[in-house]
Each structure stands twice: as structure tokens, then as C-alpha cells.
Amino acid sequence: MDHEQLLLDAAGDLFYRRGVQAVGMDEIRAASGLSLKRLYQCFPSKEALVVAYLRRRDERWTASLTAYVTDAGDRIPAVFEWLERWFTEDDFRGCGFVNAFAELGAGSAAVRTAVRAHKERLRAYLSSLAEKAGAGDPGLLAEQLLTLIDGATVTAMISEDPGAARSAAQAAATLVDQHTRERAHPPQGVRSSQEGDQAAYDG
């Protein structure tokens, strides 16, 4: 394993478990078994290390989620099944991205960018699932699902109750049903843009 991976392994565990600001570079050096000189050769600042930690966490977290949902047939309910499994893990400490943003977001543009990139990636993935589910407005449904996910994650962290995922799943099912029914049966008086164009042409 290369030095950067050793450092990211050590930093990832400490940052997520205890918080970014509570962990110093010397502690990360000790946990990694590398010298402080080597640490700064790999990451010239703590901010650079935090951003690298967030990017790697994004890759691993997203890969775990998408693999589970893919195996379940790309169903939106599987997202919340995966969340409940995550919430029951011994080292669960909430959303690492929200936690990092709360600590450093106000003072670090690089951290804000990394956190927002993760949330945007998740939103895009949820939009693709919403489209497969037949939602009339996949973007809107994705935004609503993301709100449920973030809310359930914070609730599970504070309450130490993984059942927050099941509550969010029930709300998600209601939203999915609403979005798919509206596409199949638009409200009276609302026509699609194609129907409107045809009516204008006929007139």
C-alpha cells in the first residue's frame, strides 16, 4: 500500500470517528506509522488531506450504495434498505460530509466544493432511479429523496435508532406513488407541451 493510502486510511478513521478539528496532523502521522515529513510530502496541508479524505469517502460510500441498489433491481426502496444497514454499523457517526461541512464549510472553499460534489453526485443518481421508476419530474423527486436521506441520517445519528431509515422509506414510497400517478394521470386542465403545440397548430 502506498503512503497516501496509509495516510488516508488513518485520517479517514480518525476524522469520521472524532471530527476533523479534533484530530491533529501528528496524531494522523502516528496512526499511519509514517513520518511527519512524509505526511506533508503527500499532503502539504490539513485542508488538502481533508479534501482527499472526502473525495475517497464519496467514491467508497457511493460505490457501496449503488452496488446494493443495482443488485436489488435499481429500486428506490433499496436505497433506504441500504441506509438502515449503514445506520446499524458499529462505527456509524452520521454523514461524514455534513459533519465536515459543519466544522469547516464556512472557512474552506475546497471543503465546501468537495461536500457539494458528493451531494450533487447523489442527487444525480437518485434522479436516474426516479426516471426508471416512471416519475414525471425525476429531478424534483430526487431532491425530495435527498432531503429524506439527509434527514434520516441526522435522526439516526442523534437518536441512535436505525428505524429512521424505515420512516424515511415510508415517506419515499408516498412520494414515488404521487410522482408516478401524476405522470400517468395529469390533473385536469394540464396538458403536456406536445399537446399544447398540437392545439396551437390545429388552431
Image (cartoon, rainbow, N blue to C red):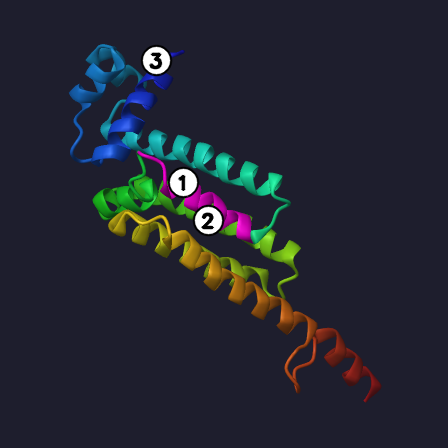
Residue 86 is labelled as 1
Residue designated by label 2: 120
- Magenta stretch: residue 78 in it? yes
Local SS, label 3: helix
The residue at the point 21 percent across, 44 percent down is 103
Residues at marks 3 and 1, CA–CA distance in whole angstroms: 28 Å
27 lies above or below 99: above
Residue 171 rendering spot, x and y as whole percentages: 46, 63
Q: Nearer the viewer, mark 3 or mark 1?
A: 1
Local SS, label 1: helix
Q: Earlier in the sequence, mark 3 or mark 2?
A: 3
The residue at the point 20 percent across, 14 percent down is 36
Q: Which SS does the magenta portion mostly show?
A: helix
Residue 111 is labelled as none
**Highlighted range, magenta:** 77-90
The residue at the point 31 percent across, 34 percent down is 90
Residues at marks 3 and 2, CA–CA distance in whole angstroms: 30 Å
Residue 183 in which image quadrant: bottom right
The residue at the point 18 percent across, 29 percent down is 23
Query: What type is the residue that disc 1 sits on?
Result: Trp
Q: The N terminus lies in which quarter of the figure?
A: top left
Residues at marks 1 and 2, CA–CA distance in whole angstroms: 20 Å
Q: The C terminus lies in which quarter of the figure?
A: bottom right
Query: What type is the residue that disc 2 sits on?
Result: Glu
Residue 91 rendering spot, x and y as whole percentages: 30, 34
Residue 57 in which image quadrant: top left
Residue designated by label 3: 3
Question: Is 16 or 78 nearer to us in this picture?
Answer: 78
Label 1, residues with CA under 10 Å away: few <14, some 14-19, many ≥20:
many
88 lies above or below 153: above
Residue 93 rendering spot, x and y as whole percentages: 29, 40
